[in-house]
Amino acid sequence: MLGFATTPREESAAYIKDWLAEFRKEPTYLFDILTDVNRAARMISERLAVEQEPATPGAIPAEAA
């Protein structure tokens, strides 16, 4: 077993119940959250891409300068 519960836990059920209550009050709740998650994931991806860009040949790394 990988540490996953095979039976529902009381706090998990309460957590899901709260999410469902929000969905009922505001149907766009999940869409709004996923939009924010997408923005955050894009920001992280862009920062990683900048950090992984190959250095200019012959350039001195910033750490060594």
Image (cartoon, rainbow, N blue to C red):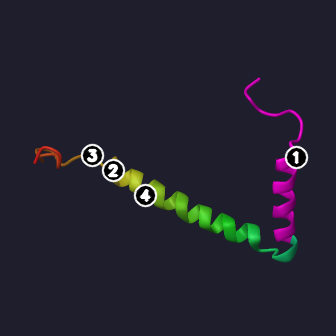
Which circle marks residue 54 in the picture?
Answer: 3
Q: CA distance from mark 2 to mark 4?
A: 9 Å
What residue did someone put label 2 on? 51
Rendered position, 30 above or below 54: below
Q: Position of residue 32 (x, y in %)?
A: 69, 71
**Which three-letter amino acid code belongs to the residue tagged 4?**
Glu
Q: If you read the primary sequence from the N terminus, does the residue marked by circle 1 or circle 2 appear first?
A: 1
What residue did someone put label 4 on? 46
Q: Residues within 10 Å of mark 3 (few under 14, many from 20)?
A: few
Question: Residue 29, located in which quarter of the rendered image?
Answer: bottom right
Q: Secondary structure at mark 3?
A: loop
The residue at the point 47 percent across, 54 percent down is 45
CB under 8 Å between discs 2 and 3: no
Q: Residues within 10 Å of mark 4 (few under 14, many from 20)?
A: few
Q: If you read the primary sequence from the N terminus, does the residue marked by circle 1 or circle 3 appear first?
A: 1
Q: Closest to the observer: 8 or 56?
A: 8
Q: Position of residue 19 (x, y in %)?
A: 81, 62
CB under 8 Å between discs 4 and 1: no
Of circles 2 and 3, the one toward us is 2
Question: Residue 17, located in which quarter of the rendered image?
Answer: bottom right
Rendered position, 4 above or below 53: above
Q: Secondary structure at mark 1?
A: helix
The residue at the point 12 percent across, 46 percent down is 60
